Image (cartoon, helix red, strand yellow):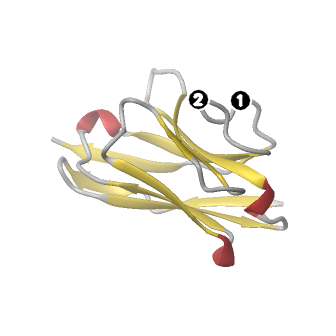
Amino acid sequence: VQLQASGGGLVQAGGSLRLSCTASGFTLAYYAVGWFRQAPGKESEGVSCISSSDESTVYADSVKGRFTISSDNARNTVYLQMNSLKPEDTADYYCAVEIGPCGDYGIYDPDYWGQGTQVTVSS
């Protein structure tokens, strides 16, 4: 069982990145998939969540209108399209899964975590 996060990098403010979270050893179809981020010296923050059952989504206020989460069940992958990036979006981004749908604020008790992918937004 593995979650592989990828797609991070260095981008200028206003730019875009697309993160991927690919599962192996299990299917995402029964899980909520969430993205979290943690900046140096700060607490982890839930960014977005998608329920694989009905593709309903949840977003943190800080990313609404800029980030879009989507799923590709054929590839067993969830994407986080990040547009209009800001320096304050700089963080390590992690994906995680929890059986069932997203809660009102995303995932509360992940069953599995992926490793982080670093996003750096320069001003």
**Where is 39 relative to 21, above or below?**
above
Would residue 111 appear left or right of 62 to someone viewing this image? right
Please, is residue 104 above or below residue 33 in the view? Answer: above
The answer for how far apart the CA atoms under marks 2 and 1 are is 8 Å
Front tag of 2 and 1: 2
Quadrant occupied by the C terminus = top left
* Residue 123 to residue 62: above or below: below
The amino acid type of the residue labelled 1 equals Tyr
Element at label 1: loop
* Crowd tier of the residue under label 2, counting other residues whose Cα lies within 10 Å: few below 14, some 14–19, many 20 or above: some
Q: Amino acid at mark 2?
A: Tyr
61 versus 75 height, above or below: above
- Where residue 96 appears, as percent x and y from the top left, is 68, 46
| Quarter of the image where one finds residue 26 | bottom right
> Residue 76: image x %, image y %?
68, 70
Indicate the quadrant containing the N terminus: top left, top right, bottom left or bottom right: bottom right
Please provide percent x and percent y for residue 54. Answer: 66, 56
Query: What residue is at 45 percent from the left and 21 percent from the top?
Result: 41
The reply to whether discs 2 and 1 touch (Cβ–Cβ < 8 Å) is yes
Asked which secondary structure carries label 2, the reply is loop
Residue 117's disc is none
Image position of 72 (left or right of 15):
right
The residue located at (67%, 33%) in the rendering is 103
* Residue underneath mark 1: 108
> Mark 1 Cα within 10 Å, few/some/many (few <14, many 20+)?
few
- Identify residue for label 2: 105
49 or 35: which is nearer to us? 49
**Whole-percent x, y for residue 83 in the image:** 28, 53
Name the residue located 79 percent from the left edge and 45 percent from the top edge. 100
